[in-house]
Image (cartoon, grey):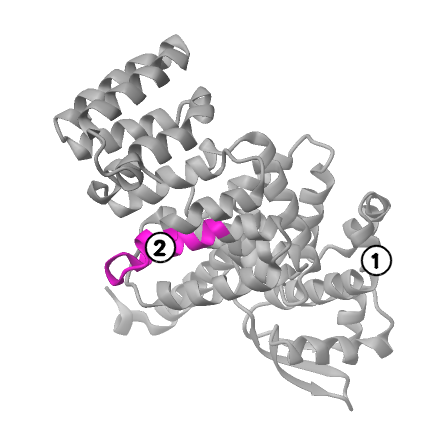
Amino acid sequence: MSHSASNMDVDVEFDVPKYLSEERQKAPSHLQQYFSTFEDLYERKLWHQLTQHILEFFKQPESGPFQVSIYQQFVAEWENKINRLSLVTIALQAASQFKDAQASVDFLQHIITKVDTPESKDVYVLAVMEAAHFQLVLGQADQVKKVIDSSEKILDGFDSVETAISASFYRVSAEYFKSQADYVQYYKNALLFLACVNLDSMPTAERMERAYDLAMAALLGDSIYNFGELLMHPVLDSLTNTEHDWLRTLLFTFNNGDIGKFEALGPHFSKQPLLQQNSAALNQKICLMSLIEAVFRRSGDNRVIPFGEIASETRLPIDEVEHLVMKALSINLLKGSIDQVDQLVVVTWVQPRVLDKTQIDGMRRKLEDWNNQVKKISTFVGQQGGEVFAQ
């Protein structure tokens, strides 16, 4: 891979300056000073500073055509002197320059071997996960799943890892689960990825795509009934005033269990075949969300609900209410019991949820009401108790 490896009697001190000089002449004028700096730092053996300048150079948009050559002809000469995370970061940037995904995988194999040591297992995860990204492009889904599973075990052994490593793991995992139409796992991993990155540095188109995919996963995931985390995430704002704005509105509609609004948004479903194909599941989901919201809005001492009220809230025939409540109990959205004789549902617990701003305001009003009740009782006791309660 490097000159020193292929021809041991080459004078490296002579060879490297010659290579850098030739590359400098090919580079755009505003990038040429980097090559002079590379040569100076290399000759002075200032490996940390040299690494930082390579990383900085690789961030320049026009450095792309030089990256593979610089890695193979120059960085490979002193790669043992480089911090392992920086080495992989440089190599990953170069790997993305290949037109062919298989060439990227082949290029990364050398790096994977370099960092497959007990001291750099976390960085090894970064390298294999990024290689898995290219394997996914090649359709090697089974191989990618093995990499995800083994990487997860390695990361579980660490108390903490660099954010870049976590971000890579969650991003590629999300890509895999998206390819498998596993909405629940995609939703989980995509949100964890977003927690690891700075949204402001993400291109607008990518932000929109992620928001769209997350919205679809939230709607179609068969065990996702709490959208709060996504609704409060700024990524969702990237759908505002776009052709997918209705999808954002639909998420809030589901979270509020608003069946009327859900039916009003129905015509938009034709824009997305997946929603049309899953209309029965979506109908059941909005009814369940409506049930949860109805319970949530009630005070803790008012959780005995007649079938008739549930039928009214969910717009279901009364003979379908019991089936809906049994479904909610079976998937742990609620805990409680059904009184079939008197047609009552006794709710003892509701699944905790992340609240949107409207729901938080509702909670505030409840607390205010409770506070007012306490004040009234306090005043009454004070009046009735006379001097016993005198302050």
Residue 213 in the image, given as x and y percentages of width and height:
64, 47
Q: Residues within 10 Å of mark 2 (few under 14, many from 20)?
A: few
Quarter containing the C terminus: bottom left
Residue 247 position (above or below residue 128):
above
Identify which amino acid the numbered label 2 is placed on: Thr
What's the distance in space between the residues labelled 2 and 1, CA to CA? 46 Å
Does residue 280 show up magenta in the picture?
Answer: no
Which range is magenta? 112-131
Pick whichever, 352 or 381, lies toward us. Answer: 352
Query: Label 1 is placed on what type of residue?
Result: Gln
Of the pair 251 and 281, the residue shown nearer to us: 281
- The N terminus - image quarter: top left
Q: Is 12 above or below relative to 367?
A: above
Which residue corresponds to mark 2?
113
Residue that carries the numbered disc 1 in the rendered image: 277
126 to 379, vertically: above or below: above
The residue at the point 56 percent across, 70 percent down is 351
**Label whose residue precedes the other's in the sequence (2 or 1):** 2
Secondary structure under badge 2? helix
Q: Main secondary structure of the magenta part?
A: helix
* Vertical order, 165 against 202 (above or below): below
Name of the residue lying farthest toward the top: 29
